[in-house]
Image (cartoon, helix red, strand yellow):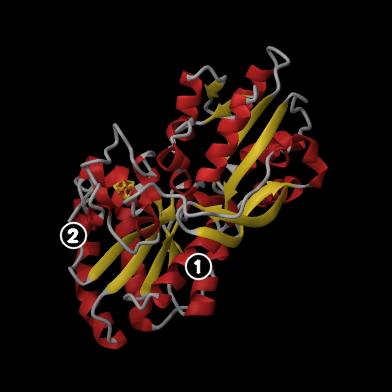
């Protein structure tokens, strides 16, 4: 893609090179740290070597935008227990392999795939709709493991709104909201007295649902430019250029929308209405991080007969990463995957030790496949 758009890529890279010293002089910073929230942006950045094109003073850090990486160990343990009690569990492929932490602490069953090996009925599906079709074939009590961000939530909500969910299929919500986590990550850099985050590249797919305006709190509250970008390498480069321009001109009033071909400022009003009809905003646990207020979705009272979370005793968060894993720092942009001593040693895509190595959206899995792109 860079080759096809080489003249444009060169033009943008040149503009980034011109703007960088101007921004450094204006802000007095030694580095310009830009967080690309989304796992797919990290994939593009690393796969296409974007860090190698940027001046060394620009630090492009990954953010918490990988739903598999941040699904708490307690959710996996709850579902393993329900599977061993006789419920059939429907899960996406990534969730199937996700390791729990209690396996390392107490030798318990390590994942839903392990539970299946021990005889539990765990089935991989591509969607909630697939689970609905499958569960109709018999009357077995079943649970769908609903993971994901706001991008996935409408596909669940629309099916609940049709009221055609079979009575023997319950829903375990582990849906996370992106904006509170992005805000949390930016604040952590401040609290830990790290180089502050100077700009945020907002997730393109999520923003098609929630709208670019959902990121306006960065410019409004923190004076940090935000831009919603697409997933081609040119999109990411353009996002960096827009952030630099805004830092230099001081024009930091609302979120820029680079992904104009798909996303809108107000988002998808129909999808947002369906989410509001079916889900309540709740506090949610992010793996390795803890509870972030108002950062998750759970079924509202209208659908409580389907709510599989009501079958389990919710426990307060306990540190839930395996020994030595630095996934919490990686998802908050405080460390790169290569800073972890287990990277590509005890932890590889074939045998993931920590959650950031499981999914193709996890920064560790991306770096394992494509290098750091520097
Ligand atoms: Fe965790 Fe593996 Fe990444 Fe290390 S390399 S932070 S163990 S996922």
Task: Specify the quadrant of the image occupied by residue 30.
Answer: bottom left
Viewed as shown, does residue 134 lie left or right of 117? right
Viewed as shown, does residue 315 lie left or right of 228? right
Number of callouts? 2
Q: Residue at x 71, y 22 (%)?
A: 141
Q: Residue at x 40, y 44 (%)?
A: 355
Examine the rendered structure and indicate whether residue 358 appears above or below residue 49.
above
- Considering the image in quadrants, where does the N terminus appear? top left
Which structural element holds mark 2? helix
Beta carbon at label 2 within 8 Å of ligand 1: no
Tell us which disc is closer to us: 2 or 1: 1
Examine the rendered structure and indicate whether residue 62 appears above or below residue 368.
below
- Residue 92 pos. (x, y %): 51, 31
Foreground of the two, 144 or 327: 327
Q: Give the numbered dot on residue 373.
A: none
Q: Residue at x 17, y 68 (%)?
A: 56
Which structural element holds mark 1? helix
Q: Badge 2, how many Cα within 10 Å: few under 14, some, many 20+? A: some
Q: Earlier in the sequence, mark 2 or mark 1?
A: 2
Foreground of the two, 361 or 289: 289
For disc 1, the marked residue is 183
Beta carbon at label 1 within 8 Å of ligand 1: no
Q: Badge 1, how many Cα within 10 Å: few under 14, some, many 20+? A: some
Give the CA separation, mark 2 to mark 1: 27 Å
Q: Is residue 211 visible?
A: yes
- Residue 108 pos. (x, y %): 48, 34
Foreground of the two, 183 or 204: 183
For disc 2, the marked residue is 53
- Residue 321 pos. (x, y %): 41, 49
- Residue 227 pos. (x, y %): 43, 64
């Amino acid at each position: 893609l860079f080759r096809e758009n080489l003249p444009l890529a060169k033009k943008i890279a040149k503009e980034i090179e011109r703007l960088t010293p101007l921004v450094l002089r204006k802000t007095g910073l030694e580095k310009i740290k830009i967080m690309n929230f989304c796992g797919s942006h990290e994939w593009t950045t690393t796969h296409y070597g974007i860090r190698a094109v940027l001046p060394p003073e620009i630090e492009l850090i990954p953010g918490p935008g990988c739903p598999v990486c941040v699904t708490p160990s307690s959710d996996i343990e709850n579902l393993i227990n329900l599977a061993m009690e006789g419920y059939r569990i429907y899960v996406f492929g990534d969730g199937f392999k996700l390791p729990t932490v209690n396996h390392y602490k107490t030798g318990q069953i390590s994942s839903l795939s392990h539970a299946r090996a021990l005889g539990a009925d765990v089935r991989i599906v591509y969607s909630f709709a697939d689970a609905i079709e499958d569960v109709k074939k018999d009357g077995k009590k079943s649970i769908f493991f609903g993971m994901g961000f706001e991008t996935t939530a409408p596909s669940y909500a629309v099916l609940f709104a049709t009221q055609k969910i079979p009575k023997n299929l319950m829903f375990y919500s582990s849906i996370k909201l992106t904006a509170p986590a992005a805000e949390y990550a930016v604040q952590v850099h401040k609290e830990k007295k790290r180089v502050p985050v100077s700009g945020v590249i907002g997730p393109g797919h999520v923003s098609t649902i929630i709208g670019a305006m959902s990121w306006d709190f960065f410019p409004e509250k923190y004076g940090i430019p935000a831009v919603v970008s697409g997933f081609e390498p040119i999109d990411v480069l353009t996002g960096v250029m827009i952030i630099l321009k805004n830092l230099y001109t001081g024009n930091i009033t609302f979120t820029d929308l680079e992904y104009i071909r798909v996303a809108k400022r107000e988002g998808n009003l129909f999808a947002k209405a369906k989410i509001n009809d079916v889900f309540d905003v709740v506090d949610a646990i992010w793996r390795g991080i803890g509870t972030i207020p108002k950062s998750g979705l759970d079924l509202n009272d209208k659908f409580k007969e389907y709510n599989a979370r009501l079958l389990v005793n919710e426990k307060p968060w306990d540190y839930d990463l395996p020994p030595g894993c630095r996934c919490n720092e990686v998802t908050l942009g405080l460390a790169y995957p290569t800073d972890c001593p287990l990277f590509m040693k005890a932890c590889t895509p074939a045998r993931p030790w920590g959650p950031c190595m499981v999914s193709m959206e996890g920064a560790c899995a991306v770096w394992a496949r494509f290098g750091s792109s520097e």
